[in-house]
């Protein structure tokens, strides 16, 4: 099993450009999440989807949108990238809303 | 809301020594405290967790202790090995209605085990 797969692994954007980070899980999990990881700040929740068809804001949702395309896939979109969105982004999934989180390997995004 | 502080930010130990990482939380309603290990270039992975109805939990060389009164919990690694070198994150979750896995993470501890 691949677990949680994120694409792309690396991306460089210019300020104002848009892009979508893709995430797919093959564990039949109901819940999916997007986190960002910044030095000295740990992991912060951007958006989550408790189940297919639902999404909700986390701690730091501003500047992002998400789509739960189906049970397997959960994408994160930056409509107009800003340098403050330079970060490592992690997608995660869990069987239930309170189960163990399984993380992907991360997507490193640089906004110039 | 919940706030989690983690110390130290970096920790260097000799192989075979013990390592201790400490976290404090602010919300007394928090009842679940996992620890995640992140190896270089990988995503975090759960290594142990504890719920508020127990004070200690062990899994081979790893143990976690919880002091609800003081609102702090700690990760203990005994007989450290080079493969224990990684970043460790603590987290806390409060059981509010409708809340999903809204874990609040600490800022991480970079553990280096010197051979």
Image (cartoon, rainbow, N blue to C red):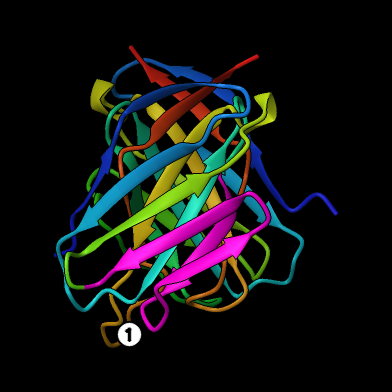
Location of mark 1 (residue): B98
Judging depth in this view, the residue of B7 and A111 nearest the camera is B7
Q: Which chain hosts label 1?
A: B
- Quadrant where the N terminus of chain A sits is bottom right
**What predominant SS class does the magenta segment belong to?**
strand
Task: Give the extent of the magenta segment.
Answer: B44-68
Residue A61 in view, yes or no: no
* Residue beneath the point at 28% across and 88% down: B97
In the image, is residue B45 part of the stretch drawn in magenta? yes
Residue A52 appears anywhere in the view? yes
Instruction: Indicate the quadrant containing the C terminus of chain A: top left, top right, bottom left or bottom right.
Output: top left
Left/right placement of residue A90 relative to residue A56 reads right
Residue A57 placement (x, y as % from top left): 29, 63
Residue A111 placement: quadrant = top left
Q: Is residue B93 magenta?
A: no
Q: Characterize the local packing of mark 1: few (<14), some (14-19) or many (20 or more) Cα atoms within 10 angstroms.
A: few
In the rendered image of this protein, does residue B104 appear above or below residue B76?
Answer: below
Residue farthest bottom in this picture: B97
Q: Residue at x 33, y 77 (%)?
A: B31
Residue B61 x, y percent position in the rendering:
64, 49
Q: Is residue B39 left or right of residue A46?
A: right
Could you say which is closer to the camera, residue A88 or residue A101? A101
């Amino acid at each position: 099993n691949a677990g949680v797969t994120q694409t792309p692994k690396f991306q460089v954007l210019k300020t104002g450009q848009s892009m979508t980070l893709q995430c797919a899980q093959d564990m039949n999990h109901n819940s999916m999440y997007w986190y960002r990881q910044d030095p000295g700040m740990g992991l912060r929740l951007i958006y989550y989807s408790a189940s297919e068809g639902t999404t909700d804001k986390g701690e730091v949702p501003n500047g992002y949108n998400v789509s739960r395309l189906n049970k397997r896939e959960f994408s994160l979109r930056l409509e107009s990238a800003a340098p403050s969105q330079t970060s490592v982004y992690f997608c995660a999934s869990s069987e239930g809303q309170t189960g163990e989180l399984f993380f992907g390997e991360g997507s490193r995004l640089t906004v110039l | 809301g919940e706030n989690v502080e983690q110390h130290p930010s970096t920790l260097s130990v000799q192989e075979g020594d013990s390592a201790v990482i400490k976290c404090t939380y602010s919300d007394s309603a928090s009842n679940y405290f996992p620890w995640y290990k992140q190896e270089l270039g990988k995503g975090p992975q759960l290594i142990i967790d504890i719920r508020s109805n127990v004070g200690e939990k062990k899994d081979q060389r790893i143990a976690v202790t919880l002091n609800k009164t003081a609102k702090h919990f700690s990760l203990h690694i005994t007989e450290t090995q080079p493969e224990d070198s990684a970043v460790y994150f603590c987290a806390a979750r409060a059981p509010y209605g409708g809340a999903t896995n809204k874990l609040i993470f600490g800022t991480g501890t970079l553990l280096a085990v010197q051979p």
